[in-house]
Amino acid sequence: NAGVMQNPRHLVRRRGQEARLRCSPMKGHSHVYWYRQLPEEGLKFMVYLQKENIIDESGMPKERFSAEFPKEGPSILRIQQVVRGDSAAYFCASSPATGLFNQPQHFGDGTRLSIL
Amino acid sequence: RKEVEQDPGPFNVPEGATVAFNCTYSNSASQSFFWYRQDCRKEPKLLMSVYSSGNEDGRFTAQLNRASQYISLLIRDSKLSDSATYLCVVPYTGGFKTIFGAGTRLFVKA
């Protein structure tokens, strides 16, 4: 499967624990995006990364959330000291390098995070 | 004004009907636009890309009106399988932040 791979599909954490969500982009894609979707709501942009660089993190909460896309390995979205309000579906998308006309993003299956 | 605005619906239509959704955007510099569909609890899937005045793919037609800053999606001969939420997507020029509309829900009934 050459699509965007996210894992785990489902993640359960207790309040105060850490959550790590992983995303491997499609082959040949160098741009990764993370989105959060609350139940019955639309997708909210969180962060846009290229290899080893955070390009736009304007959608990330100021505390507890961080993202990285290392030279080797998947992109990681990390949530520290999770709270009930972090329960959501987290989607990762990837695209090839963009120019003036943006390329469409391709999405992974998402990680459903549940906080007990 | 919201950056990307869609009529949430729901639109309830019978099989075979023609239905159209509109999406308005605020950033006049946006150059490209996309329509995605999202089924319940699944990932968004690309439906159409719109780079110029419009695009057509089978029963689906997307049109762009730059002067009025809206894009539309027309679905002809609706099928039961078209039932989904349709998301309008506007990337910012230069490829940074991407704004998704809240989506328009469509129910096609037999």
Image (spheres, coloured by chain):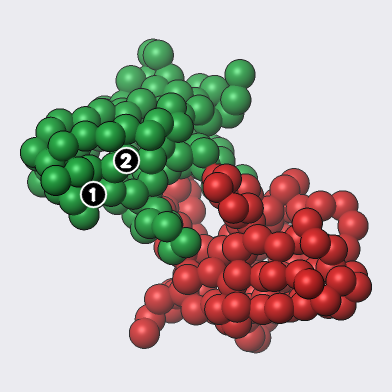
Chain colours: A red, B green
Q: Amino acid at mark 1?
A: Asp
Image quadrant assignment for residue A55? bottom right
Judge by depth and name the residue closer to the eye, A22 or B64: A22
**Vertical relation: B30 (above or below) B110:** above
- Using the image, tell me which numbered label, if any, was put on residue A52: none
Give the residue at the far front of this rendering.
B110
Judge by depth and name the residue closer to the eye, B20 or B54: B20
**Vertical relation: A113 (above or below) B102:** below
Judge by depth and name the residue closer to the eye, A68 or B45: B45
Asked if the residue under mark 1 is in contact with the one under mark 2, i.e. CB atoms within 8 Å, the reply is: yes
Q: Position of residue B27 (x, y in %)?
A: 55, 26
Q: How many marks?
A: 2
- Using the image, tell me which numbered label, if any, was put on residue B106: 2
Image quadrant assignment for residue A73? bottom right
Q: Position of residue B109 (x, y in %)?
A: 20, 43
Tell me the residue that label 1 is attached to. Answer: B82
Q: Is residue A57 something one can see in this rendering? A: yes
Q: Left of A46 or right of it: where is B100?
A: left
- Residue found 52% across the figure and 38% down from its top: B102
Q: Is residue A48 something one can see in this rendering? A: no
Q: Left of B25 or right of it: where is A111?
A: right
Subunit of label 2: B
Q: Position of residue B46 (x, y in %)?
A: 34, 54
